Amino acid sequence: MKGVLSERKTLHPLDIERRELPAAAGRAVREFAREISAALDTTRHDAAALATTLTDPALIAQIDARVTELPADVSRTMRPPATAAGATIVSRLPLTDDEFGPTPPSWREAAEWSGAAALRAHSFELDLVMLLLARSAGEPFGWQGQQGGRLVNNILPSPGHEHEQSGASSKTLLSPHSEDAFHPERANLLMLGCLRNPDMVGTTVSSVRRVELTADQRRLLSTPTLPILPDVSYGAGHERFSAAPLPTLWSSAGPDETTLRYDPAYTPLDDADADFRAAYAKLTTELERVCVTAALAPGEVLLVDNDVAVHGRVPFIARYDGTDRWLKRVNVRLPDRPRRAEEADENGYGQRIVAPFRAAVHSAFGSGGCDPARTEGHRANQPVTIEREAAHDRGSFEHP
């Protein structure tokens, strides 16, 4: 079973929370990014780490120093979504469509900032803008094998990948899912920043706190029944790890506090009994019913609470003429939202994170101890790149 939203469905116009970054705050973020870029140009730094992963120690130190100088309006605006929708659109980040040059054909070329020097500088500055915003919200992190370990990912259509369940696709409707649902160190908050979206292609968002389920369905879905596997983009090798059953729903204090881990395309639903499959199908139907779309304009940032909402993308026709949709994405951990103790012993199928903003070796869990092989911190002012046992290239195979 592959739980995807029907392409014939009608999206329900439920409200999504909207916030506006004050003009002075938006200008400050852009100016600080320019100043950081200029400062890095005048110092000796690891150019490869800077260009490839954004984990150069000088860059990380600059972000950490300058984020404390930003207007308080920035952190207030970038706080997690505050409504049951589990998503917020932040507007008024100052940028123009002509700053970044043509939309590249792949994330690799976007990461290389191809084009004239001025365009490369602007693209790099927007990566710094995304890091400043993400650091204002929490702890930005990356995946060692995802787009080469970059902290800021580029999401754009790529030729030959039109029909994949990936962020590089276009013609297919992408399945709603929790980002990296299989992993205990998944993001609490997902940031999607829009550079370009002339066709107003919509990102779909569905909140588990808006669904209607019976008490029995909630009980079944809260029982650890099936594992969630890494998607195909993580490559081979995860078969070496035990696939422990996980709850789909966590309902510690009733429906208003429900969270979920949901990725039906990588959940072996055929292994469950009929009652569980029926409850899971009802959840899928409900997530479709409450779906909203966020068609981002340039300068808008979508915040998705990855514990509350699933996201996907509607189909569109890519032109590959340099004008296609182009988003920047950052995964963010919220330090004041620790993972449940029940998740602490999960192996994550050997997939590791890149965590250069972590000040000490620690786990993202509230209890259960630390697994330094899975997540490590910032030591001796050096950025941490945590090797994965199952390396992959997620660049052409990632959700939007």
Image: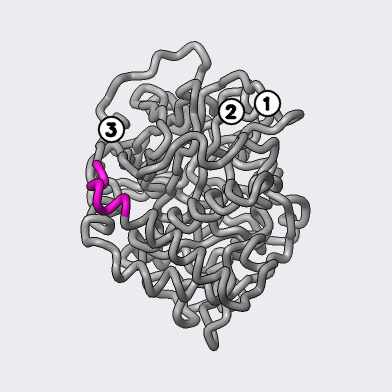
Range drawn in magenta: 20-27
Q: Give the left or right position of residue 252, taking residue 160 as reference.
A: left
If the image is split into quadrants, where does the C terminus sit? top right
Colour scheme of the picture:
one colour
Query: Where in the figure is residue 342, as x and y percent of width and height?
Result: 43, 64
Residue position marked by numbered label 3 in the rendering: 16
Quick check: marks 2 and 1 in contact, CB under 8 Å? Answer: yes
Query: Where in the figure is residue 178, as x and y percent of width and height?
Result: 48, 44
Residue position marked by numbered label 1 in the rendering: 320
Dot 2 amino acid type = Asp
Distance in Å between CA atoms under marks 1 and 3: 31 Å
Mark 2 packing: few (<14 Cα in 10 Å), some, or many (20+)? many
| Quadrant of residue 165 within the rendered picture | top right
Residue at 62 percent across and 34 percent down: it is: 102
Residue at 50 percent across and 78 percent down: it is: 370
| Quadrant of residue 332 within the rendered picture | bottom left
Q: Give the left or right position of residue 180, taking residue 301 as reference.
A: right
Q: State the residue in front, 374 or 395.
A: 395
Element assignment for label 2 = loop
Does the magenta run of residues contain 23?
yes
Circle on res. 324: 2
Image height of 33 relative to 202, above or below: below
Image height of 338 relative to 195, above or below: below
